Each structure stands twice: as C-alpha cells, then as structure tokens.
C-alpha cells in the first residue's frame, strides 16, 4: 500500500491549500481563499510516517498503508474543493487547473524518476531494468496504477525489484482529477445544480460498493484502479462542502468530533489487518475520521488541531510529498544492495536518514523554486525538458534490452537461469486458484475425484503446494493427488467460511465435501509463516475420526531474494558464502517445532529442510540441470522433483517412514 500525490497540495501563503498553485501570470485568479491550516500538514505527517513505517516493517505495522487512504481524503478536500469553488465562480479552466497540477507534481516526481533510473542501473539485471523502464514510462504517463494492475500476479517480480511501485497512487489521483471536474462543470450551472452533492454522494457509494466487491473477487483491481478508490477522494470533496455547523457551532461538540476523528484514524492504524480485506469496508473509519478532522478544523481550531499544528509535524507534512517520493526507491535499492528481505533496525535507521536527506532537499530545492512565480512558459519548458530526459532514458534502456553489457556473460547466464516455471505441467482442471479468484472458480468434481487402483491424497495449501505437486505427481505415479490450492493463501488449518477464497475453499474441501472426496490422506503444504498448533491438532483429530491420515510437509528453503540473483551476485561480488547468509532464519525454528508437534499429536511430518539442507547447507543447483529455483522460494520443475526424490531417499519424515506411509494409505479401502 503506497501513498501518492495527495501529499503535494501544501501551501503557506495564507490561502486555502492549493489556491496559490498558480502564478501572477496565470489566466485565472485563485478563489475560495482561506487561512493556512497547519493541522492539515500535521495530518499529512501522521499519514506519511505511517506509510514509511509500514514499508520498513510490514509485518509489525500492517495497517500503515492506510496513510494512502487518508491522503486521498485530504487531496479531495483541498483540490476537489478548489475545483468546485472555481466552477461555482465560473473561473475554472482546464488549462489553468492542469498547469497548477503540473507545477506541484511534475518537478520533484520527474527528478526522482531520473535519479532512480541512474541508480537502478547498478543493481538491477537486464530483465529487471527493462521492466523498471516500462514502469517509469507508465508513471510518466500517469497510468502507473494500470501498469502494476496488469503485471501483478502471484509469481510476478517481488516488490524488492520495483522501485517505482509507489507511483500507482499518483496515477489514481491524476485520473480522478482528469474525470472529476466534468461532474460540476456539467451540473453546477444547470437546473440540476441542487443535486450536485447528492450525485457526488451516489458516485462515492457506488465506488465503495465496487471496492467491497473487488476485495473478494479481484483484489488487485480493488487496490490499484480508480473505480474502487474514487470514493476515498470523493469523501474529501464532500467534506469540503460541509460547513459542519452541527459539529462546529459548539466548542465542546467541535472538540469531541475532532477527537473522535483522530481516534478513528489511530484505531484503524492499530487494528486493521490485511486479512480483513483491503481496501474495502475496513478503510471507511480512517477516511471518515480524516474527514471529521478536516471539517472541524474550519474556523476556530481545537486542542486536536493545535496538536497537529506543532512545528515538527508541520514541517514533515510540508515535505511529505518529497518524503513519499524518495522513501520507496531508497528502501528497494538498499535491499537490492544488501540482498536482504526484512529490514533490521539498523537498516531502517540508514533508510530513514537517506530518505530524510533526499526528501527535505527535494522539498527545499526542487519543489520550492517551482512553487514560486515561475512563468507558465518557463515552467512548461523546464517540466517538458525533464520529462523528455526521463522518457529518453527509459527508451534507451528498452532499446538495448536492459543494458546487458554491464555484466559478464557468466553472471548474466546465472541470473537468467532457473526460470523453468513456464514448462511445468498444469492440472487438467481449475484446481489451483489465486487469492483473487472466487470459490465458484474451483472445479470440484475433477479436482476431488478419486482414482481407482491408486492411493488418493488430498493436497491442500498455497503456491508451495502447487510447487511440490509438480514433483510429487511425477515421482510418485502410484499416488493420485486430489488438489485444492490457493496461491497466496495463509492456510487455515481449522477453516471457517469468511468470504475469503482461501478460507471458503478450505472449508469446502476439508469440512463440507470431505466425505465426497474420501481421501486416504490429507497432505498440507504451505509456507508456514506462522504456526497454529491448536488448529493443527483439531485438523488431525477431525481427520483421524474419519480414518484419514494427516501428512504435513514443512517449510522449504526460502531466501531473501530470488536464488538466481543471489547466485549471480555471489559470482559478481566474489562472495561464495552469500547464499548461506540470505536464507530466511525462521525456517529452522518452524521446522523443529513442527517435527516436535508431529510426535506429540501423531501426524506424519515431511521435512524438506532435512532432505535439501544437509548440515544447513541447502542444495540450490544440480550439476546436470542447473538451478533448482525460479524465484526466492519456489522450486522449478527440476527442483520440485529433486526435493521429492531426496525426501524419499533420505526418509526425511517424522512419524511413519515415507515409504511406509505410502504403503499404508494405499492399503486403505472404503
């Protein structure tokens, strides 16, 4: 979750934020001027800090991405309010409006893209750099959100190689302001003008409904695309049209309302979790809370607004656009340099220092001069020149195929190896879903069908189950695998229907339709990010009551970056120990815990770590077939078969020996 151009409308001229975006040579005069409000910059500060902390520590502060939604509300309140006031005064022109947007957004944004492009030529490999260049061109065209929507699938490039991923929200915002002005222009001076606010309210409610629906059926669309984000900006626009007398006429009511708004934001930042379905309905309290703070800050301020207006908060808010622009490229490129997944405290401190230096320098020396009274022609020349330089850099990268001459042939060969996922066999039916699918996409009859004369195992889990299925189905032809897999699924071991495809599908196959599938064993394979031992025991007991064996496959070796990249960097840096230092440390602890619970509970445990990592030195390549991985944690076809063969050969199981387990389940009949 990233934030965007809502950071940009900060003014200190004593006018309503954004109304000073023009110059003394602008064709229209500013309208709807109001005193500068430091509390809005304070609200921006809270939001940008939340977003940055979220990106530094996504598992510890998972709701920090709500800062995006708060910024959308602020943007709608300021910029949307200015549009409505200009239209009402018959002073609105598209030329003046977009000149003001260009003045605010383009200079710092394009300089960031140019600088990030130059630095990215150091760590990014040709394919990654070419993808970066395409994303940069999309960002320059204000369609970055659409680009990332179409390129976001489960096995797409990790965000660690996408320095411009954060530009999606600028695309959403600029698309909003490309469409929104037509609404008041068409209605404000017609006989329907009294219906303008109700019509805007209806569009907001429709957009919210789309967001709620998309969260369950198309999460990427809900996140990236304007139809599901429109309502957030429209909440701000509607707030700008509310005098709020019922909230602000009495000091106590004003204070209580402002405190309630800030409390709603704080509660959302502390309580919202990704599994709640994002953006969707869970975003509403934070957006309404931001609207309350904005409405109650009109006129006399309260203690809440004065607290938001303290100098440190105001200065962070004033620089928030530039801080936002720089923080994500700094995080991505730092991770690339260090080849790390999760940032430690010392890493976060370094990232914050670099972000602060670049962000405040950009605000002072790039945003500041262009916010001044630069003539439109000069502004256009500067912005046009910067955009041309940025675009030509990307075209050059694409024309050369990602500048491959930066690397030796050996390094390039290693970096491009391992990508054999495309040749992997596919199931005949739609048994593998993504977290953007619906349960209705699952082909129950062929996916759960038994095969006579074979042992029938029900395979459930996430993409790691799919990965291992490719080896299991080849190496163990005597076993028929009934399959129900959801990529990106946090496997519910005691599943209950919640509306999420992962929960609902697992409830269907492990509870509701278990007697239809009648498997000899249930094989659970997933990443084991967290361990829910009580739920695992309940699953075992429920299956045991039906005479079904539970087989659990533990975590497979995972790394902080794609294995081909780590191996290439190992050669490039002459550092043979690099691979061992980049394995995820949680794996060993979870493997030990699952092995211990297998003895205590009584299920069969298969340990890929035991099979593939003798003496904790994991096997990642074959002398005959090359690398066994195609990314940081998924085996390719050869890797999957190798892992299964080593599991059998090494008898890397806890409970039954694997060969005996196969024999025992084969002997069961119904």
Image (spheres, rainbow, N blue to C red):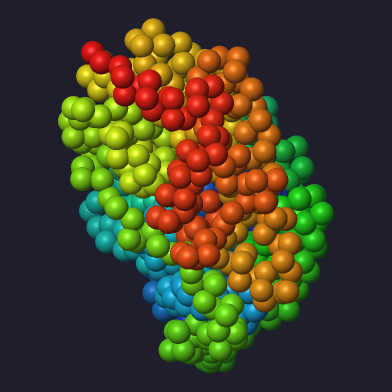
Looking at the picture, how far across and down is residue 482, in whole percent? 28, 32
Along the viewing direction, whichever of 48 and 501 lies nearer the viewer: 501
Residue 172 visible in the displayed image:
no
Which residue corresponds to the image point at 49% horizontal and 72% vertical from the top-left? 416
Q: Which image quarter is the C terminus in? A: top left
Along the viewing direction, whichever of 408 and 67 lies nearer the viewer: 408
For residue 652, above or below residue 298: above
Q: Which image quadrant for residue 16? A: bottom right
Looking at the picture, how far across and down is residue 32, in whole percent? 53, 61
Looking at the picture, how far across and down is residue 245, in whole percent? 54, 36
Q: Is residue 64 left or right of residue 446?
A: right
Number of numbered tags placed on the structure image: 0
Looking at the picture, how far across and down is residue 166, in whole percent? 54, 61
Which residue corresponds to the image point at 36% horizontal and 32% vertical from the top-left? 459
Residue 163 visible in the displayed image:
yes
Which residue corresponds to the image point at 46% horizontal and 64% vertical from the top-left? 625
For residue 598, above or below residue 242: above
Q: Which image quadrant for residue 183? A: bottom left
For residue 559, above or below residue 610: below
Along the viewing direction, whichever of 40 and 636 lies nearer the viewer: 636
Which residue corresponds to the image point at 43% horizontal and 56% vertical from the top-left? 638
Q: Which image quadrant for residue 147? A: bottom left
Q: Is residue 14 left or right of residue 533?
A: right
Q: Is residue 598 left or right of residue 280?
A: right
């Amino acid at each position: 979750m990233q934030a965007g151009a809502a950071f940009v409308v900060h003014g200190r001229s004593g006018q309503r934020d954004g109304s000073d975006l023009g110059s003394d040579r602008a064709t229209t005069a500013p309208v709807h001027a109001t005193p500068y409000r430091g509390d809005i910059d304070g609200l921006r500060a809270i939001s940008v800090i939340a977003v940055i902390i979220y990106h530094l520590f996504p598992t510890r502060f998972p709701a920090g991405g709500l800062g995006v939604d708060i910024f959308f509300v602020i943007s709608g309140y300021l910029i949307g309010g200015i549009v409505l006031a200009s239209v009402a005064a018959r002073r609105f022109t598209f030329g003046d409006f977009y000149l003001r947007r260009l003045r605010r957004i383009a200079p710092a944004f394009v300089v960031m893209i140019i600088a990030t492009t130059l630095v990215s030529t150091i760590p990014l490999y040709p394919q990654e750099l070419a993808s970066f260049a395409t994303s940069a061109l999309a960002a320059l065209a204000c369609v970055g959100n659409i680009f990332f929507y179409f390129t976001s699938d489960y096995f797409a490039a990790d965000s660690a190689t996408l320095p411009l991923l954060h530009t999606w929200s600028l695309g959403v915002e600029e698309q909003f302001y490309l469409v929104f002005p037509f609404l008041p222009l068409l209605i404000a001076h017609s006989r329907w003008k009294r219906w303008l606010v109700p019509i805007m309210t209806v569009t907001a409610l429709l957009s919210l409904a789309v967001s709620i629906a998309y969260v369950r059926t198309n999460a990427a669309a809900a996140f990236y695309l304007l139809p599901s984000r429109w309502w957030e900006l429209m909440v701000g626009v509607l707030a700008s049209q509310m005098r709020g007398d019922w909230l602000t006429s009495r000091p106590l009511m004003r204070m209580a309302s402002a405190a309630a708004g800030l409390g709603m934001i704080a509660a959302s930042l502390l309580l919202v979790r990704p599994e709640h379905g994002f953006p969707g309905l869970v975003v509403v309290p934070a957006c309404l809370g931001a609207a309350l703070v904005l409405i109650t800050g009109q006129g006399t301020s309260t203690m809440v607004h004065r607290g938001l207006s303290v100098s440190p908060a105001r200065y962070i808010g004033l620089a928030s656009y530039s801080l936002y622009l720089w923080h994500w490229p700094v995080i991505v490129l730092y991770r690339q340099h260090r080849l790390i997944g999760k940032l430690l405290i010392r890493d976060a401190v370094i990232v914050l220092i670099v972000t602060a230096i670049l962000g405040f320098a950009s605000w002072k020396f790039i945003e500041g001069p262009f916010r001044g009274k630069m003539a439109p022609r000069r502004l256009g020349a500067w912005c046009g020149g910067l955009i041309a330089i940025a675009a030509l850099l990307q075209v050059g990268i694409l024309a050369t195929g990602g500048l491959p001459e930066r690397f030796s042939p050996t390094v390039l060969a290693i970096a491009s190896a391992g990508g054999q996922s495309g040749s992997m066999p596919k199931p005949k039916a739609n048994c593998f879903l993504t977290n953007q699918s619906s349960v209705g996409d699952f082909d129950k009859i062929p996916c759960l069908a038994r095969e006579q004369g074979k042992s029938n195992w029900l395979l459930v889990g996430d993409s790691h189950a799919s990965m291992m299925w490719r080896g299991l189905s080849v190496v163990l032809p005597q076993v028929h695998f009934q399959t129900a897999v959801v990529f990106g699924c946090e496997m519910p071991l005691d599943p209950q229907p919640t509306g999420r495809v992962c929960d609902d599908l697992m409830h269907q196959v492990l509870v509701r339709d278990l007697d239809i599938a009648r498997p000899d064993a249930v094989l659970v394979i997933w990443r084991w990010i967290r361990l829910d031992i009580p739920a695992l025991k309940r699953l075992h007991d429920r299956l045991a009551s039906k005479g079904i064996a539970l087989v659990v496959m533990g975590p497979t070796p995972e790394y902080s970056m794609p294995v081909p990249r780590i191996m290439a960097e190992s050669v490039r840096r002459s550092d043979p120990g690099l691979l061992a230092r980049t394995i995820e440390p949680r794996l060993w602890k979870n493997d030990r815990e699952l092995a211990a619970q297998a003895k205590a509970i009584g299920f069969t445990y298969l340990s890929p770590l035991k099979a593939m990592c003798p003496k904790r030195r994991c096997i990642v390549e074959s002398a005959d077939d090359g690398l066994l991985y195609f990314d940081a944690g998924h085996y390719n076809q050869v890797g999957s078969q190798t892992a299964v063969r080593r599991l059998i050969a090494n008898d890397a199981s806890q409970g039954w020996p694997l060969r005996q387990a196969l024999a025992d389940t084969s002997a069961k009949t119904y």
